Structures are given as structure tokens and as C-alpha cells.
Image: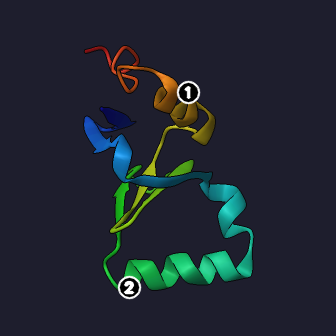
Amino acid sequence: MYLHIGENYMINKKDIVMIGNYESAISSEICKEFFSMAEEEGFILDYSKGKARSFILTDEKIYLSLISSNTLGKRMKAKDGGLQYAGK
């Protein structure tokens, strides 16, 4: 199954390691440094149009999403990965 993270983009649920609140994460200096390095190395894919509310960590990439981490968490539990929210 797949998780819809916004902007018509989906991630395979089995690849997801963690979903977190982006604003909370970057309030920590060490996390801010981690995201900065990940961005420099090309590991971040921004699907939030620069207004990230959450991040999705996989074993290969970090995805930024406009959708809150709470909503993404609910979608993880849904059998359809949140497609009813995406209007599909």
C-alpha cells in the first residue's frame, strides 16, 4: 500500500521509517543541522512548496509535506493510504 503525502505524490508504506512534525524538528539545532546536510547532499524532496508541516523519513530520502504529521499518521492506518482525502 501507498501513503498519499500531497501534491499527488505517494510513498510505499513499507519504505517509511518515521513521520515527524517538521517545525518541532527544526527547533532543535542538531535536527536543523541534519536537515541542512541532507538538503546539501540531495536527500530531501520538498513536496510542500517551501511550507513544510511534516517530514517523512525513508531509508533513502526525506520527503517534506504540507500535510500535518497527525493526518499522515491517520493515513498510515487507513487501508487506502489516504486516497479518500486526495479526492481519488
Task: Tell me the quarter of the picture where residue 71 sits.
Answer: top right
Position in image of residue 45 (x %, y %) = 33, 62
Q: Height in image: 81 above or below 19?
A: above
What quarter of the picture does the C terminus occupy?
Answer: top left
Give the residue drawn at x 66%, y 57%. 23
Between 66 and 63, the one nearer to me in the picture: 63
CA neighbours of label 2 inside 10 A, class few (<14), some (14 to 19), many (20+): few
Position in image of residue 73 (x %, y %) = 56, 35
Identity, as a three-letter code, of the amino acid under mark 2: Glu
Q: Height in image: 45 above or below 39?
A: above
| Residue 40 marker | 2
What quarter of the picture does the N terminus occupy?
Answer: top left
Q: Which residue is mark 1?
A: 74
Disc 2 is placed on an element classified as helix
Q: Which is closer to the viewer, label 2 or label 1?
A: 1
Give the residue drawn at x 53%, y 54%. 18
Q: Is residue 52 in view?
A: no
